[in-house]
Image: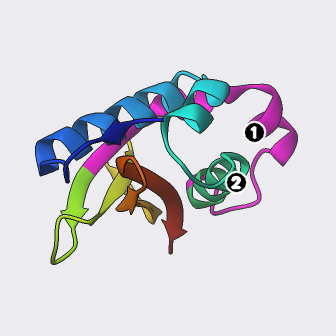
């Protein structure tokens, strides 16, 4: 898990979020779950899959068995909250921005600051 001794700059946070998304896109789920403090990745996979397949296309069996579909996704934009303690990322597939975003927070801990999340925003 990434920890900073001082509140990190936005560029530092974006770098970790980009790394998180890179690991996710390449199917390295155990590494994803160790990079940030937060939720199990299964809800992220479910949300992305649901947003990607708005019709009744492939079953969730493919989602869990073959993670190659994640490689088709990209970060479309970073959206910062009013402070630098919250950022969400919009995700795209081709030219289409998905109807779900991933949100991350910077939270103080006993040893510094850590990145938590992601939450899914619809």
Q: Position of residue 63 (x, y in %)?
A: 75, 39
What is the secondary structure assignment of the residue under circle 2?
helix
User: Is residue 53 at least partly visible in the picture?
Assistant: yes
Find residue 105 and name its label. none
Pick whichever of labels 2 and 1 is earlier in the sequence.
2
What residue is pinned by disc 1?
A: 63
Q: Which residues are magenta?
A: 52-76
In the image, what residue occupies the spot 66% across and 46% down? Answer: 41
Is residue 60 shown in magenta?
yes
**Residue at 53% across / 65% down in the picture?**
120
Residue in front for this viewpoint, 83 or 21:
83
Q: Residue at x 37, y 62 (%)?
A: 107
Is residue 59 something one can see in this rendering? Answer: no
| Coordinates of residue 76 in the picture (x, y in percent) | 27, 49
User: Is residue 41 in the magenta section?
Assistant: no
Label 2 close to label 1 by CB (< 8 Å)? yes
* The furthest residue to the front: 110
Report which quarter residue 18 is drawn in.
Answer: top left
The residues bearing labels 2 and 1 have C-alpha atoms spaced at a distance of 8 Å
User: Residue sitting at 23 percent across and 43 percent down?
Assistant: 14
* 13 lies above or below 27: below
- What is the number of the mark on residue 46? 2
Give the SS element for disc 1.
Answer: helix
To which quarter of the image does residue 53 belong? bottom right
């Amino acid at each position: 898990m990434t920890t900073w001794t001082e509140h990190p700059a936005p560029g530092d946070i974006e770098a970790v979020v980009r790394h998180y998304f890179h690991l996710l896109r390449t199917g390295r789920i155990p590494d994803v779950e160790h990079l940030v403090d937060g939720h199990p990745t299964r809800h992220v996979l479910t949300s992305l899959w649901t947003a990607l397949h708005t019709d009744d296309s492939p079953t969730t069996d493919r989602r869990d068995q073959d993670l190659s579909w994640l490689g088709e996704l990209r970060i479309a934009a970073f959206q910062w909250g009013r402070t630098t303690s919250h950022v969400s990322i919009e995700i795209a597939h081709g030219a289409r921005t998905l109807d779900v975003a991933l949100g991350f927070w910077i939270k103080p801990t006993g040893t510094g600051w850590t990145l938590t999340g992601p939450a899914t925003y619809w």
